[in-house]
């Protein structure tokens, strides 16, 4: 890690609301540290405010080098929300701070560009999906796009966690994620407030997920020459997220494209970003 220029691994936990992100974080902590079961992670704040909304990405220390991040879940995504999810995943939104997100494209781009260069974090995406939910074709397309962008942003294929493993058709889902090109897929039954009696199999599952995460980090070490420096990777993420904002075709962009500011910006920057994706 140090040789690569990173000093922390962020397991970027993401997925739709209610699929078990917070429970997964609690489960990893419980499997690794034991003690009394604690509900540490719960939903981040979401407070409406003028012209934007406040968001928090909560972080939970797992070990000296591994931090778990409970990112905001996505539901039915509109284009504004997508930009925000990618900004979180790209580590362009601070941890444990309320951030007010504005809808305006100009303010968005400025915020993304101004994001602190926290490039010493190695980002590893973890996608949570509940086996209770079937994946229809429309949703599958959306998830496919998300997983692809997650890989572009971080350089890693997301680790897939299928929660509620006994409550749904895990096999079909596993196959669906394999068809989307995913390699690491783990069915789990989270430790929850209702049921947190330790079992060896559950503990083993959570620890093997951690072990897999560390293998991926080692693999990054072995293939470091295929990636840029941490700063270069950070700049690439900024460009990708700005490009997503540019390309999402939202009404807002069309409205704002009437503005002088946007025209000027487009001239200068668009060509540069379009090369990247
Ligand atoms: N039986 C079971 N319940 C779960 C599992 N994962 C989460 N839950 C429950 O599902 C609900 C939503 O989980 P939560 O972690 O808050 O989801 P989040 O919105 O993605 O953070 C909670 O009531 C959890 O107790 C699981 O693997 N098995
Ligand atoms: Mg949660």
Image (cartoon, rainbow, N blue to C red):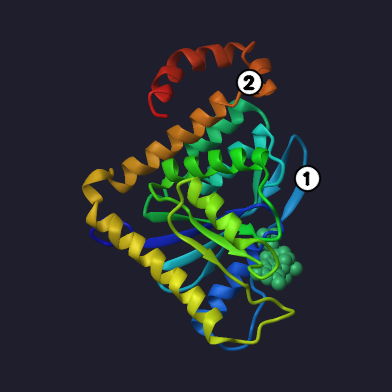
Q: Quadrant of residue 219?
A: bottom left
Is residue 71 visible in the rendered image? The answer is no
Q: Quadrant of the C terminus?
A: top left
Q: Which residue is mark 1?
A: 48
- Describe the element under mark 1 as helix, strand or loop: strand
Residue at 60% of width from left, 30% of height from top?
107
**x then y, percent, for residue 206:** 51, 74
Q: Which residue is mark 2?
A: 253
Q: Quadrant of residue 43?
A: bottom right
- Describe the element under mark 2 as helix, strand or loop: helix
**x then y, percent, for residue 243:** 49, 28
**Local crowd size for mark 1, using a 10 Å CA cut-off: few (<14), some (14–19), many (≥20):** few
Residue at 55% of width from left, 62% of height from top?
161
Residue at 48% of width from left, 45% of height from top?
150
Residue at 38% of width from left, 49% of height from top?
119
Determine contact: label 2, label 1, CB under 8 Å.
no
Is residue 25 visible in the rendered image? The answer is yes
């Amino acid at each position: 890690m140090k040789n690569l220029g990173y000093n922390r691994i962020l397991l970027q936990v993401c997925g739709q609301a209610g699929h078990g992100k917070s429970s997964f974080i609690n489960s990893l902590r419980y499997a690794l540290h034991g003690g009394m079961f604690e509900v540490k992670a719960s939903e981040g704040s979401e407070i409406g405010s003028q012209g934007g909304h406040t968001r928090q990405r909560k972080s939970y220390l797992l070990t000296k080098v591994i931090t778990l991040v409970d990112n905001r879940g996505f539901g039915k995504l509109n284009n504004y929300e997508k930009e925000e999810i990618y900004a979180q995943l790209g580590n362009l939104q601070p941890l444990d701070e309320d951030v007010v997100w504005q809808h305006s494209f100009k303010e968005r781009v400025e915020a993304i560009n101004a994001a602190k260069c926290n490039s010493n974090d190695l980002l590893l995406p973890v996608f949570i999906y509940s086996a209770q939910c079937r994946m229809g074709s429309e949703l599958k397309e959306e998830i496919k796009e998300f997983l692809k962008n997650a890989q572009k942003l971080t350089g890693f294929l997301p680790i897939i966690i299928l929660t509620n493993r006994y409550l749904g058709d895990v096999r079909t889902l596993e196959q669906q994620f394999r068809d989307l090109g995913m390699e690491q897929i783990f069915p789990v039954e989270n430790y929850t407030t209702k049921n947190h009696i330790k079992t060896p199999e559950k503990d083993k599952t959570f620890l093997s997920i951690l072990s897999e995460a560390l293998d991926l980090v080692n693999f990054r070490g072995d293939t470091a020459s295929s990636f840029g420096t941490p700063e270069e990777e950070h700049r690439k993420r900024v460009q990708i997220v700005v490009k997503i904002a540019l390309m999402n075709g939202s009404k807002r962009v069309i409205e704002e494209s009437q503005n002088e500011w946007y025209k000027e910006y487009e001239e200068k920057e668009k060509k540069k970003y379009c090369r990247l994706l």
